[in-house]
Amino acid sequence: MMRCSDDVKRFVFLWTTLFLSVSLVLSGCGPESTSKDVESYLAVSLSLDSNNDLEPIQPIPLTISLDQQKVKLGDRLFHDPRLSHDNTIACSSCHNLTKGGTDQAYRSTGINGATGGINTPTVFNSGLNIRQFWDGRADTLEDQIDGPTQHPAEMGSTWPEIIGKLQQDQSYTKAFSTIYADGITVATIKNAIATFEQSLLTPHSRFDQYLRGDHDAITAFEKQGYALFKSYGCVACHQGANVGGNLFQQFGLFTDTDTMRDGVERSQVKTDDHENHRHMVKVPSLRVAVLTPPYFHDGSAATLPEAVEKMARVQLRRHLSEEEISAIVAFLHTLPGQYQGRDL
């Protein structure tokens, strides 16, 4: 008899899980009608300790192969305010690595005190995203860099200005000439920063340890939260190694979306003008969500419990109890891992 490979098993399990999750959502089952379906799902999910390799969420790789010279140079550029017009704002000003890769602000502040129009997403694990920006308008990390460096409300600079500043610094000219044959150019600056951003993975979370076989790495209550996260349909959008970041969704499936579109006109994944393709946002990664309030592209949720309650209501048509919200939040607290060997 032919035996299925682990990859085939994982594929079947993942899509079965997503199918069940979406089916529960589309069936409209609320708290009053989940006793059989959800309790059965929870019982199965909580018994899967020996099959964690088949889960819809995968561990972040423990290591990644990158040119460490480029990482070091990109790190320096990422933290250099000279990339802004008035030498006051660096990439790290809005993507603070001590604050979960964000500034934990409703809106970020750029040069001359200008205020941005959308909540800043985390830069941690951004290399795992399918595209960059909330509306997905940048294909790659390199493409994304054009936005903030030249936006008048962010860094307000130009590439000729940035290159001119860096060329005046002998340590930069030496570092670039050592690594890149072309020296300091738009492409090499962007490549160095993007390589550094690729290094911003957060592996070895407690949940990843659980997925890799340490069944005691998370508590029974946290496992219950994960089971709810799957059975109630959250995992239909938040899955993969980044627990999100790999698809786009309309914000507010079961509510008036006109009040939930602040700052997002359309997803650039779609290139036509069909109305159904408008007002979509990239599903955010939840890997470091516990560290990055406020939440959503519009920053409208101040706390994680508020965000969980709102998502359940407007995306899944569910009204969660306080205990259910607490369990899901407890699960989310297992997701942050380590950066440079230290817990986030």
Image (cartoon, rainbow, N blue to C red):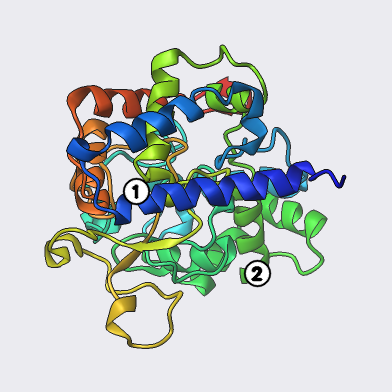
Location of residue 39 (image quadrant): top left
Viewer-nearest residue: 50 or 170: 50
Sooner in the amino-acid sequence: mark 2 or mark 1: 1
Viewer-nearest residue: 94 or 21: 21
Residue 66: give its label. none
Please give the name of the residue rendered at 68% of the width and 37% of the height, measured from the top-left corner: 61
The spot of residue 173 in percent (x, y) is: 70, 57
> Please, is residue 96 above or below residue 70 in the view?
above
> Please, is residue 283 above or below residue 291 in the view?
below
The spot of residue 220 in percent (x, y) is: 44, 14
Residue under numbered circle 2: 187
Location of residue 265 (image quadrant): bottom left
The spot of residue 53 in percent (x, y) is: 67, 34
Quadrant position of the N terminus in the picture:
top right
Give neighbour class at mark 2: few <14, some 14-19, many 20+ (Cα, 10 Å).
Answer: few
Q: Residue furthest right?
A: 1
Please give the name of the residue rendered at 19% of the width and 25% of the height, measured from the top-left corner: 322
Which is in the foreground here, disc 2 or disc 1?
1
Location of residue 188 (image quadrant): bottom right
The spot of residue 111 in percent (x, y) is: 30, 57
Q: How many marks?
A: 2
Query: On the picture, is 166 further left or further right than 283?
Result: right
- Tell me the amino acid under the disc marked 2: Ala
- Tell me the amino acid under the disc marked 1: Leu
Viewer-nearest residue: 86 or 181: 181
Please give the name of the residue rendered at 33% of the width and 88% of the height, measured from the top-left corner: 273
Viewer-nearest residue: 2 or 103: 2
Query: On the picture, is 16 further left or further right than 253?
Result: right
Residues at circles 2 and 1 in contact by the CB criterion of under 8 Å: no
Residue 336 visible in the picture: no
Residue under numbered circle 1: 24
